[in-house]
Image (cartoon, rainbow, N blue to C red):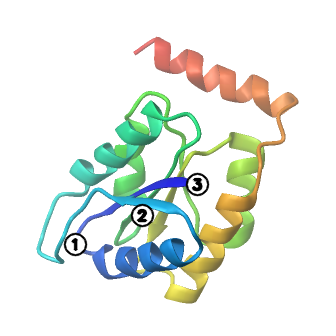
C-alpha cells in the first residue's frame, strides 16, 4: 500500500519509527518531512500528506505531532481527506469502518511506539463497511463542495 507520512518536530522521532515499521511490513512509504527534529510548523506537513492522499484514491496517510490534534486539523483542511486522530486500536478500526478515514493522526506525546504500531496495523487492515456509513461520508463530501 502507498502510505504518505509526515510530522512536526514533536512527532519526528515516532514518525521515524513508524516509517521503519511500515517499510518492514512491505508498504511503499513516502516521507514528506521533516528530515530532522528541528522546530517546524505542523500545518505544512499535514497539508503535504493530505494533498498527496487526496490525489491518490488508494493511498493512505499517517501524520504525527505532539498531540495529533493540530496536524489532524491541518490535514482535514484538504478536500477529500478524512483524517482521524486515534489513540487506540478501536478508534482506528471505527475510523475506517464508519468514516472511511484515509489519514491516521497520532499524538507522539500521548502514545508509545508499541501502541502506535498496533494502531497503524488496525487502521491499514480495516476496511470501510459502506451501507448507512456511505451516506454519511457522502454528506461530508457535500460539505466540502460548499467551501
Number of the front mark, 1 or 2 = 1
- Residue that mark 1 sits on: 9
- Residue that mark 3 sits on: 1
Of the two numbered discs 1 and 2 on the same chain, state the one appearing first in sequence: 1
- The image quadrant of residue 94 is bottom right
Instruction: Tell me the distance, in whole angstroms, between the alpha carbons under discs 2 and 3.
Output: 23 Å
Q: Do the residues labelled 1 and 3 touch (CB within 8 Å)?
A: no
- Please rate how many residues cluster around mark 2, counting C-alpha atoms within 10 Å: few if below 14, some from 14 to 19, many from 20: many
Of the two numbered discs 1 and 3 on the same chain, state the one appearing first in sequence: 3
Q: Residue at x 82, y 34 (%)?
A: 130
Mark 1, secondary structure of its residue: loop
Q: Residue at x 59, y 74 (%)?
A: 25
Of 121 and 20, the residue lying toward us: 20
88 w.r.t. 68: above or below: below
- The image quadrant of residue 51 is top left
Of 20 and 72, the residue lying toward us: 20
112 w.r.t. 21: above or below: below
Instruction: Tell me the distance, in whole angstroms, between the alpha carbons under discs 1 and 2.
Output: 12 Å
Which labelled disc corresponds to residue 66? Answer: none
Number of the front mark, 1 or 3 = 3
Residue 132 as seen in the image, left or right of residue 144? right
Mark 3, secondary structure of its residue: loop
Number of the front mark, 2 or 3 = 3
Of 34 and 28, the residue lying toward us: 28
- Please rate how many residues cluster around mark 1, counting C-alpha atoms within 10 Å: few if below 14, some from 14 to 19, many from 20: many
35 w.r.t. 55: above or below: below
What quarter of the picture does the C terminus occupy?
top left
- Residue that mark 2 sits on: 68
Amino acid at each position: 500500500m502507498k502510505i504518505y507520512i509526515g510530522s512536526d518536530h514533536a512527532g519526528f522521532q515516532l514518525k521515524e519509527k513508524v516509517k521503519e515499521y511500515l517499510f518492514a511490513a512491505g508498504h511503499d512509504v513516502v516521507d514528506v518531512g521533516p528530515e530532522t527534529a528541528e522546530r517546524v510548523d505542523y500545518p505544512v506537513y499535514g497539508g503535504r500528506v493530505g494533498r498527496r492522499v487526496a490525489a491518490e484514491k488508494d493511498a493512505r496517510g499517517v501524520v504525527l505531532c505532539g498531540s495529533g490534534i493540530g496536524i489532524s486539523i491541518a490535514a482535514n483542511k484538504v478536500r477529500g481527506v478524512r483524517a482521524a486522530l486515534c489513540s487506540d486500536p478501536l478508534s482506528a478500526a471505527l475510523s475506517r469502518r464508519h468514516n472511511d478515514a484515509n489519514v491516521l493522526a497520532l499524538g507522539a506525546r500521548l502514545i508509545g511506539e508499541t501502541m502506535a504500531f498496533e494502531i497503524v496495523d488496525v487502521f491499514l487492515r480495516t476496511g470501510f463497511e459502506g451501507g448507512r456509513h456511505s451516506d454519511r461520508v457522502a454528506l461530508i463530501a457535500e460539505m466540502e463542495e460548499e467551501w
